[in-house]
Image (spheres, rainbow, N blue to C red):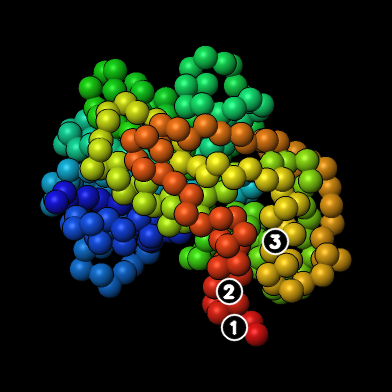
Amino acid sequence: MSKILVTGGLGVVGTELVRELRERGHEVWVCDLMHNHHPQYIRCDIGEYRQLERIFLEHTFDYVYNLAAEFGRWNGEDYYEKVWHSNGIGTKNVIRLQEKYRFRLIHFSSSEVYGDYDGIMYEDVLDKVPIKQMNDYAISKWVNELQIHNSQLMFETETVRVRLFNTYGPGEYYSPYRSVICTFTYRALHDIPFPVYTGHHRTNTYITDCVNALATICENFKPGEVYNIASTEYYDIKTLSDLVLKYSGKPESLVTYKEHEPQTTIDKKVDNSKAVRDLGLKTTVSIEEGIRRNVEWMKKIYNIK
């Protein structure tokens, strides 16, 4: 059993990851921005060094899963100050404390770091090909990876980086900045029109498939590794919209079709073979079943008959 801190542990992925790690017998502590009643919870903004340091003065951790971050492409444009405070300064604070206290770090990056790359996204592509990240959120996540790389070279810190590809499922409450499947589902259920960019393609990973692989990292930790956490299912965005409409029982008239969303990756074709090999990543919930479950969850949460 390991003692683990999960930053951002009240978020969509964090909540499920904490549950999975505890089920596997680990002692798991959580920090996040809000107050919470759980005895193994500490309120903390990782962008504030004093708040974060206080945790490590009181506890010794074997592993830290660093999920705390501002999320999303358009959120990064509208709230760029928060993005750079949490993602840039916050991650640097975590790394500084890792250099001092020597815990092993699992850092959450994003598929957005692949930017304008139009080939198959292997983990080492960014070491071989000049790539332009396409928005502040993506840039901040790549900066984090460079910060980690520098720390590994200078201080021999031990870190694994994970790049999540469009994780979705129950637990993701709506805001305009949330994932495509979340926003499509919420708007369809509430009869709110929404755009669909038909020229884009994605792979989407159901939440439980994602966290099963993530929880395995601390049990098979390989310092310096990078993993794509992604399904092998690959669809255009219209397919996702069609499935949401099918299971919500809503008409296609809610949708306005457009070709491309500006400054956003067009295609995300991914190789996930390393995560399959090392972490046991597998798709157990298909995109159709996952969207059906997500629609039913949202109906319940938002009291829609």
**Which amino acid lies under the numbered mark 3 shown in the image of this protein?**
Leu
**Of residues 173 and 212, which is closer to you in this image?**
212
Q: Residues within 10 Å of mark 1 (few under 14, many from 20)?
A: few
Q: Position of residue 14 (x, y in %)?
A: 38, 56
Give the answer, above or below, for where 300 lies relative to 67.
below
Q: Which residue is mark 2?
A: 296
Which numbered disc, 3 or 1, marks the residue that appears first in the sequence? 3
Q: Which residue is mark 3?
A: 243
Which quadrant of the view contains residue 11?
bottom left
Q: Which mark is residue 153?
A: none
Q: Position of residue 88 (x, y in %)?
A: 44, 36
Q: Which quadrant does the C terminus fall into?
A: bottom right
Which quadrant of the view contains residue 174?
bottom right
Of tags 3 and 1, the one toward the viewer is: 3
Which quadrant of the view contains residue 193?
bottom right
CA gap between label 3 and label 1 equals: 21 Å
Count of marks overlaid on the render: 3
CB-based contact (under 8 Å), mark 2 and mark 1: no
